[in-house]
Amino acid sequence: MEFKNFSVNECMEMFLMDEKLIKEQICDVCHRMWQLGWVAANDGNITVKLDDGNFLVTPSGTSKSFITPEILIKVDKDGNVLEGPEGYKPSSEIKMHFRCYEKRDDVGAVVHAHPPVSTAFAVAHIHMDDYIMPESVLTLGSVPIAPYGTPSTNEVPDGIEPFLNEHDAILLENHGALTMGVDLLTAYYRMETLELWAKISMNARLLGGAKEISREDIDTLMDLRINRYNITGRHPGYKKYNK
C-alpha cells in the first residue's frame, strides 16, 4: 500500500475545505432551527471546535434565518476574534459554550436554542426524567434543569457545570435548552430528540400520565448503547457507560 506525502500547502488546502464544509453545516443547522420555530429574532447560538483548537461561532444580534458562512466568526480558546467581518461580534453566550469544552474534552460542538415544548418544561421547572421512549433513553437519559442565570454572564456556565459530567442535554431554567456532541450533527440531533420527547411527554400528561419503560428493558437499552450502537457522549443512568 502506498501512502502519499502531502505538502504543507496541500494540508492547508484540505483544512480550509473541511472548515468550509463545517461553516455550511452551521448555516444549515441555523436555518433548520429557525424553520422549526426553535429560535426567533436573534435567539440561539452554535459553536464548533476546529482541529486547530479554535472555534467557529455564530454572530451576536443576527437571526439564525440570515446566517451565512461569510458572517461566522472564528475565535481562539480565550474568545479573542481571529477572523470575522467588521461589525460582527461572537455570540454573547460564548461563555456557556466554552464551559462545555473546558469540562468535556469529548465535546466538539454545542447548540443552544429555545425549542418551545422543552423550554416550557424549563419555564415550569419540571425536570424531564421519565424514561418513556427507547430513543430518549438511549440518547439522553434524564435531562436536568440548571438554575437560572443572567444571559451572557458567568452565572449561566456556573449553573450548568455541575451537570456536564453526566449529561449531553441540559434545560436552562426560564431560558431554553443546551445540547452538545462530538460534532455538530450529533449536538443538533440531540436537540431534536429532546424536543420530540418533550412533545410526547406533554401529550402523555394530558392523557393521564406516561407509563415508563421497565428497569429490565432500560438495562437492555443501556447495553445496546455501549455494545452495539457505540453512542458517544455521557449518560446519567450509568456512570460506567460514560466515556
Image: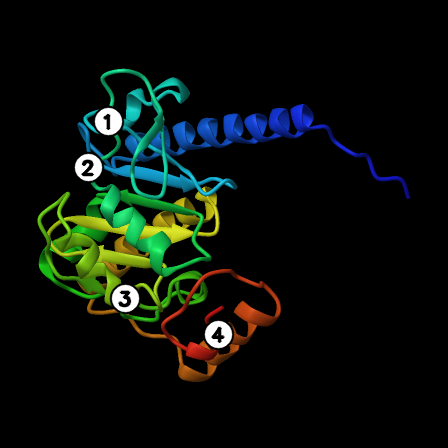
Q: Which amino acid does label 4 sit on?
A: Tyr
Q: Please tell me whether mark 4 sits on a helix, a strand or a loop.
A: helix
| Marks 1/3: CA–CA distance | 28 Å
Mark 4 vs 1, N-terminal side? 1
Mark 2: give few (<14), some (14-19) or many (20+) Cα within 10 Å.
Answer: some
Counting residues from the start of the chain, the first of labels 3 and 2 encountered is: 2
Residue of label 3: 163
On screen, residue 99 versus residue 238, left or right, reads left
Q: What colour-coding does the image apply?
A: rainbow
Which label is found at residue 145? none
Q: Which residue lies furthest to the front in this view?
A: 8
For disc 2, the marked residue is 92
In this rendering, position of residue 173 left or right of residue 241: left
What crowding class fits label 1: few (fewer than 14 Cα within 10 Å), some (14-19), or many (20 or more)?
A: some
Foreground pick, 198 / 58: 58
Q: Mark 1 points at which residue?
A: 89
Determine the image quadrant of residue 172: bottom left
On screen, 168 above or below 119?
A: below
Q: Residue at x 39, y 18 (%)?
A: 70
Q: Mark 4 points at which residue?
A: 241
